[in-house]
Amino acid sequence: MPATASFDVTTGVDLQEVDNAINQAQKEVAQRYDFKGSKATIEFKRAESLILLVADSDFQMTALFDIVQSKLIKRGVPVKNLDVGDIKQAAGDTVRREVKLKMELDGETAKKVAAAIKDAKLKKVQAAIQGEQVRISGPSRDDLQEAITLLKSKDFGVQLQFGNYR
């Protein structure tokens, strides 16, 4: 048995679930009466982790985003990991909005997670930033459970995932 136990704190979304949610949203938009004859489209660029929304007006854009958001929630995709852009004017009297998916912890969030662990002054529990994840380690699994509970109680702007627990 190892002398120290550890786990990794990461974030991300299941791209297949996002793809399924977008497909469901596209079907709903095709069937809804308020979108008949409009240029409303939803496009998922998987390689860029980007959802592109195009609509005729701000009102339709709001309705389109609500549809996408509700489908993502139903598929279990954390909406905290959405980086919603502003509504911008596009060609042909349309408006567009880009929604980026946060797939990894950025440096700022990783620092906040590490700082939260250090500020809690848990016994011998240490946080080390390793690229796009934070490794939390300590001698006791009970202390690590306390650290997980502490991190779940705080809001870091993304949904944290805890993995590699050993």
Image: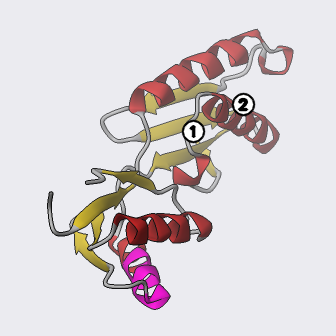
- Judging from the image, what secondary structure is the residue with disc 2 in? helix
Residue 152 horizontal/vertical position (percent):
55, 63
Tell me what residue is drawn at x 42 percent, y 80 percent.
Answer: 117
Q: Position of residue 129 (x, y in %)?
A: 25, 73
Q: Main secondary structure of the magenta part?
A: helix
The boundaries of the magenta stretch are: 112-121
Pointer 1: what residue? 91
Which of the two discs, 2 and 1, labels the residue nearer the N terminus?
2
Decide whether residue 119 is among the magenta residues.
yes
Circle 2 crowding by C-alpha within 10 Å: few under 14, some 14–19, many from 20: some
Residue 20 included in the magenta stretch of the image:
no
- Tag shown at residue 34: none
Residue 6 vs residue 79, the one in the foreground: 6
| Image quarter of residue 135 | bottom left
Taking the spot 60% from the left edge, 25% from the top edge, the residue there is 41
Task: Kindly identify which residue carries mark 2.
Answer: 67
Answer left or right for 98 relative to 141: right
Left or right? Give the position of 122 relative to 59. left
SS assignment at label 1: loop
Q: CA distance from mark 2 to mark 1?
A: 23 Å
